[in-house]
Amino acid sequence: MSFSFISKISLYLSFIFIISCQNTFSSLNNNTDIIDYNLQLEKEDFLDFSLYEDYQENVFDSYTYKASNYNFLDKDQNKLKINNYESKYKNNNPINIIYLENNIYSINIYGELLSFDLNTGKLIEKIVIELDQLKKVPISFSSYENDFIIAFTSGEVVRINKKGKIIWLFKNPDLLNTPVKIYDNYLIILYPEKIIFLSTLSGNIILEKAFKSGNIIQSSGGKIEIFYNIVFFILPNSEFNSLDTYLFEEHNLNFDKIELNTSLNNLKDQIHIYKNFLVYFDNGNIFHTYDINKDKFILTDYRINNSSSAVLFNNSLISKNDNFLEFYNIQNGNLFTRININMILNKNSKIINALIINQNMHLFMDDGEIIILNQNLEIQETTNLKIKNINKVYNYQNKIFISTKKGLTYIY
């Protein structure tokens, strides 16, 4: 047999091998060129594009979510830029902007109430709130029944009217680094080692419960999620627990069967509710999914690929690393899809939020890039807002707010 004949046969076999490999690769995504064969493609379920809004009438806080239909591809639409914090953020949560009646309100680093023009975004008035603490750095700014509720890192929480007059003041000596959540007629406050339910009407304590721990207090604060009458929370000391708001006692949760990573750093921990499923995203790389109704885990210790940033959205965990966007099914760990982003996104950018706008998913990056995907998780468009150092994206009242580390907020 001649050498040239053997070479032709070898070339033919190599070609068949390459084609078969390409078919295997494309089973996850046509743009994918590296596959982890331990990952399974989701074949029976779809990523849920439904809108699950979270809001109460006449209430707005850091957890409010109400949909918007803004078109980011329409270059003619106006935006406002507001200097609402008047300083750079240093490891503290971004402060909200609130539309109330005919003005825009916020609070700056010094604890002063700011009022802005609704149409131009220019500062109208700056009001000093008569509090006795020296350092009045705010951690959250909320509205309730046309008043404002402000929480400070000093541990104080105050309800004021639009003129800055104090209605009630709650004092606590503990550090506060978690935004306050308004739930029914209560404020839910997470101090480093305790949770407090406060009356929105009087500022009196309804419930106070301590959860001691030897873990380091995290600068990023705690986390709160609510499922009907059950409040799930992670305290800044990394203690995870739940309370029944009807009975005001601990809710028995069969969560002690797993060992959560509560070492030195839990800054990336997240909790998320989707229908009857609770997801605990541990240390930014492992997630556990718990069926609340059945009181059992359906997935534990599922480790995702090298993730630099991730958000939990409906029935998915969306992760970004240097090369890919990966969409995991929270119920079984299978991939809805994987998208090669080498030529699309900066490898160092991070996902800030995922929103459904006009029936498409919008993924917001901290460098101002937005990826718009249809319900087949195919990229439709990308656009750059030309805004850097984004630290929060939120929406309500048919507007989208983009906060930056410089203390500015852009309103779309």
Image (cartoon, rainbow, N blue to C red):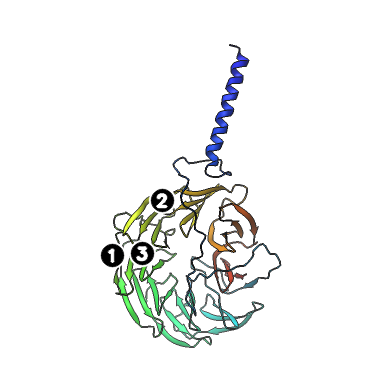
Dots 3, 2 in contact, CB < 8 A: no
Q: Is residue 204 left or right of residue 84?
A: left
Disc 1: which residue = 252
Residue 322 showing in the rendered view = no
Secondary structure category for the residue under label 3: loop
Q: Amino acid at mark 2?
A: Asn
Which marked residue is nearer to the observer: mark 3 or mark 2? 2
Which marked residue is nearer to the observer: mark 2 or mark 1? 2
Q: CA distance from mark 3 to mark 2?
A: 29 Å
Q: CA distance from mark 3 to mark 1?
A: 20 Å
First along the sequence among labels 3 and 2: 3
Circle 1 packing at 10 Å, graded few (<14), some (14-19), many (20+), is few
Disc 2: which residue = 332
Residue 249: % across, % down: 28, 72
Q: Can you tell which quarter of the image residue 22 is in?
A: top right
Secondary structure category for the residue under label 1: loop
Residue at the front extreme, as displayed = 44
Residue 144: % across, % down: 47, 81
Residue 134: % across, % down: 46, 80
Circle 2 packing at 10 Å, graded few (<14), some (14-19), many (20+), is some
Q: Residue at x 60, y 24 (%)?
A: 11
The quadrant of the image that shows the N terminus is: top right
Disc 3: which residue = 237
Q: Can you tell which quarter of the image residue 114 is in?
A: bottom right
Residue 259: % across, % down: 32, 54
